Amino acid sequence: MALKKVLLLDLDDTLISTLNRQFSVLNDFFEQILKKPFCSFEVYKKHKSDNLSNLNIYKRYDLDHAKNELLYQDYFQENIEKEKYLSKDSLLVDMNIFKSLNLKYTLNILSLRKQSNNAMRQMEIMGFTKLIDTFYFLPHEKNDNPKIKKISELKSREIIFAFVGDSESDRKAAESTGVKYFHVDREFNLSDKQSTSINNVLKKL
């Protein structure tokens, strides 16, 4: 029996939605640290659909951002992967589709996370540990794309079918290593692009 090819999958905003988690960290920063009001979740989603980064959204609502920006960045990085915020994440992928994919491919997750223990507990709660062969959680690197190095390493010992992701850095990681790439649009950018939702992309594989 032939070995199954490996399908690499990004996690955040590809298989799961982190929108509520990101909003909650920002909202708590304004409420608890700055003691200032922040925008509603609906307005936050609109900002994200306009391709604003969290940093730029923050700056819109804190007139003292020149003084507080480092405080915000430290708070966001310290809290974004805490379990109380990870619990805000929700599934984007239909797990029935995912189960059928598991029969065709060896599924590996390739994600930028620095707190791997919290990430694994989240994966167990959300039902991924029964379907994923290997989880690769890589720390963020300011001036580098760590997924490029990991995919290159995996190619030396695995037959990789493709990489599924949602960001330009995911696309570059695939292209830099000669791996086929399938792009998923983020939930707030879908509208008339339903063919690029995660479930429609996976159905075609």
Image (cartoon, rainbow, N blue to C red):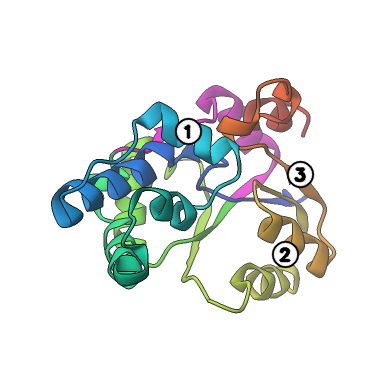
Q: CA distance from mark 3 to mark 2?
A: 12 Å
In front: label 1 or label 2: 1
Compare marks 1 and 2 and give the one earlier in the sequence: 1
* Quadrant into which the C terminus falls: top right
Query: Toward the viewer: 56 or 86?
Result: 56
Q: Badge 3 local density, few (<14 within 10 Å), some, or many (20+)? A: some
Left or right placement of residue 195 versus residue 95 in this view: right
Instruction: Give the residue at x 62% y 77%.
Output: 144
Mark 1 and mark 2 residues within 8 Å of each other at the beta carbon = no
What's the residue at 37%, 31% (across, down)?
41
Of 140 and 155, nearer the camera is 140
Amino acid type, callout 3: Phe
Numbered range of the magenta stretch: 88-107
Q: Secondary structure at mark 1?
A: helix
Q: What residue is shown with label 1?
A: 45
Q: Which mark is residue 173?
A: 2
